[in-house]
Amino acid sequence: MNPKPYLSQLAACLLLSILLSACGGQIDTPTPQPATATTEPIPTSTPKPTATPEPSPTPTNPPSPTPEISAEMEAEMAEIQAQISEMRGLAAGEGLQVEVYDTQELEQYLEAKLRQEYTEDEEFQELVTLAYLGLIPPTFELRDFYRDLYAEQLLGFYDLEKNEMVLIQGVEFDALGRMIFAHEYVHAMKDRAVDIDGRLGLNNESCAQQADRCAALQALIEGDATLASALWMLANTTPQEQAEIAAAGQAATPVLTNAPTVFQEDLSFPYSVGVAFVQYLFQQGGWGAVDQAYLNPPQSTEQVMHPESYPADLPLEVSLPDLLPVLGEGWELLDQGIMGEWRTLLLLTSNIDPQARQEVGAALPAVTGWGGDAYSLYYNLDSGQAVLVLKTQWDTAEDAAEFYAALEAHILARFDLAESESELIEMFQYMQLGYAQYQLLEDTTYYILSPSEEVSAAILEAATGD
């Protein structure tokens, strides 16, 4: 499953309602404990940035004057910077560039980012992959959705590429606006300390190659800023202001609210699951343990979902053979990558067909024990047919059998069209999706979607080597 376009030069597309639901307006203040062995880096084959001690907090200089920002607002931003720097232990942002975009400038910015970071080929890859897995309709307009979503959610952000803070004109610098600034300021300071889009690898090229690692990395970054800004809120706003912030989180966001379930869940991951991961680290060893994670970042969403497994439980390398010789002329490899534990969970819980959508509480145990996976998507441009193969290796044969049972229930529900709405039947016909094959071999499962039983059988034989 290709990663969504993160507009990855942004350290945060601040999803306000998600951020506030993660904070709840009343997050409990974690009590740091002495650092344990779980917070110490271990040797891995993944290159890590050289550890550079972060300078102690120093007095903050106000941002460079911006015509759209009043002197009062400049002073408030400087105060927040000093508060965050002291609380989070980050160097103050001397000379931090702050820009203000009006509505037209924001639209132009988003359009340019989408053109730069989300090509038509990438859009088509994501569309076919997600539609074949049953997570979005095959005619879903992805580009329009992302553009409208980001425009709806963005109230302020830090641009990693330009190293500048962007505020949206008309957003009041009330308690909510100040909390947003605090959140983004954490990103700005961590970027200066560790180079998020450079050494750390949160950029389009890296995310396209390592989507699951990228999701885990984003969870660390957003979880950090979410926890820090929540603690800032508790320390620097009144109960009435906190209630106003929480109420603002309930504001209507029709693009997100009406989006397919997979997007609602996936977009929440860095904030909800990410903040739980960071809070776990904080409880182990305070902000020092969180900072240490940037030097040895999580390598999979499994580590984020099960922080007790970090950093020792590294994902297994899983491979699939080249299946073009089996498929024959006219086929091409359209997409390949790693689903990861998180998106394997979404496979079971976020189908557009309600009868194939499992409850998270029931599906989560079935994906726990994920060890590693690989998927490949092949497409025939002439016929419009596709073949998707997912191979997953589990920690134990018991883990594999548990997922296999959940996958079987999902497939049987999804392909039971007897009582399905005509719209769902038309989607199957539109995609020429005719058959699902699944197989359990000791600690490994296979899931194949294709136009026919014959194609699936041939692909399974080639994938398993039988």
Image: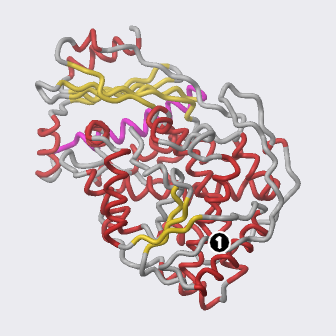
Coloring basis for residues: secondary structure
Number of numbered labels in the structure image? 1
Rendered residue at 64%/70% (across/down): 229
Residue 228 % position (x, y): 68, 66
Nearer-the-camera pick, 418 or 213: 213
Name the main secondary structure of what is drawn in magenta. Answer: helix
Q: Residue at x 63, y 39 (%)?
A: 199
**Quadrant (top left/top right/bottom left/bottom right) for the N terminus:** top left
The location of residue 160, given as percent across then percent down, is: 54, 53
Q: Quadrant of residue 119?
A: top left
The magenta span reads: 395-417
In-front residue for pair 255/327: 255
Q: Residues within 10 Å of mark 1 (few under 14, many from 20)?
A: many
Residue at far bottom of view = 240
Location of residue 95 in the rendering, given as x and y in whole percent from the top left corner: 65, 64
Residue in front for this viewpoint, 192 or 42: 192
Name the residue tied to disc 1: 230
Identify residue type, mark 1.
Answer: Ala
On whether residue 221 falls in the magenta region, the answer is no
**In the rendered image, is residue 275 in sight?**
no
Q: Residue furthest right?
A: 34
- Taking the image as shown, residue 229 lies to the left or right of residue 286, namely left
Q: Is residue 69 above or below residue 260?
A: below
Q: Can you give x and y, in whole percent of width and height, for residue 431 in the image?
A: 17, 37
With 250 as the anchor, is 111 left or right in this view? left
Residue 432 in the image: above or below residue 53: above
- Please check the rendered image and state whether residue 406 is part of the magenta-colored stretch, yes or no: yes
**Is 66 or 408 nearer to us in this picture?**
66
Secondary structure of the residue carrying numbered label 1:
helix
Residue drawn at 39 percent across, 37 percent down: 407
**Residue at point 49% right, 55% down?**
10
**Can residue 267 be seen in this snapshot?**
yes
